[in-house]
Image (cartoon, helix red, strand yellow):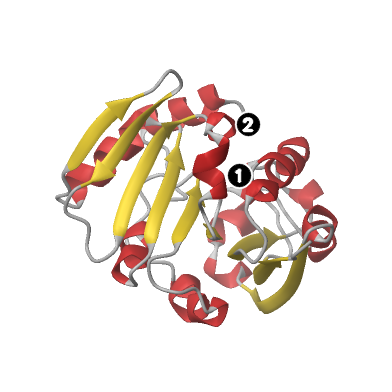
Amino acid sequence: MKAEYWLQRWQEGRIGWHHDTVMPLLEKHWPALGVPRDTRVLVPLCGKSLDMLWLARQGMQVLGVEISPIAVESFLAENHLLARVGTTATATRYEITNPPGGGIEIINGDLYKVDQAGIAACRAFYDRGALIAQPAAQRERMAREVYARLPAGSRGLLIVLDYPQHEKKGPPFSVDADEVHRLFDPHWDIEQLERRDILASQPSFSEEGVTALHTAVYRLTRRRA
């Protein structure tokens, strides 16, 4: 999806993907990654997710990337966070000065224009909604231009939705197990940690005619050369 689409959604307050609680699947499965404290964790398309606060409380150094300045400013205001703000040619950087535990930095800009060193410094990632927010061509680009920059040994937690794509126009888009393997197999070891039927708890999908809906959680480990 183009940046203008997401900017408009934030401006209009149409952010149904945002939750006012930490994602339970993150709390449940993050420990399975065995990520050491003080690891830099990439959170693409982070919005104003409380998951960043949770990761910081685990001692992580969070690097969030978000296109909407409204999302970033809301995250700061709603969580009583202070930040040092700096600008580059392509983005605005917010370094949280009172993080709850580890650290949080948010880059307000285009994910694909984040400098190479910034991505390469991350040795973990958390993707709850970034991949499923993109149509197929953009998912391929994200795997190729973002996740492929992470160094060998990096670990990630990927959470996706899986439903008959022809029954609903995304976003969020369906990403099934075959696609996860197609996108990541060349460079990552992949393990499905959980797959759960959630249709009954998502009435908006049923109302649109979706007949099956699952969430799936994957642990990814970047292979060494």
Give 43 or 211, whichever is nearer the viewer: 43
Establish if 172 lies above or below 108: below
Residue under the point 73% across and 38% down: 141
Quadrant where the N terminus lies?
top right
Image position, residue 23 (x, y; %): 43, 67
Establish if 82 lies above or below 53: above
Q: What is the secondary structure assignment of the residue under circle 1?
A: helix
Residue under the point 64% across and 66% down: 153
Quadrant where the C terminus lies?
bottom right
Does residue 147 appear in this view? yes
Q: What is the secondary structure assignment of the residue under circle 2?
A: loop
Which quadrant holds residue 192? bottom right
Mark 2 vs mark 1, CA separation in Å: 8 Å
Does residue 172 appear in this view? no
| Dot 2 amino acid type | Met
Give 193 or 34, whichever is nearer the viewer: 34
Mark 2 burial class by Cα count in 10 Å: few <14, some 14-19, many 20+: few
| Dot 1 amino acid type | Ala
Image position, residue 158 (x, y; %): 61, 63
Establish if 101 lies above or below 4: below
Residue at the far front: name it: 225
Asked if the residues shown at circle 2 and circle 1 are in contact, with their CB atoms under 8 angstroms apart, the answer is yes
Residue under the point 22% across and 63% down: 100
**Disc sitting over residue 221 in the figure:** none
Residue at the disc numbered 2:
1
**Disc sitting over residue 133 in the figure:** 1
Residue under the point 55% across and 81% down: 32
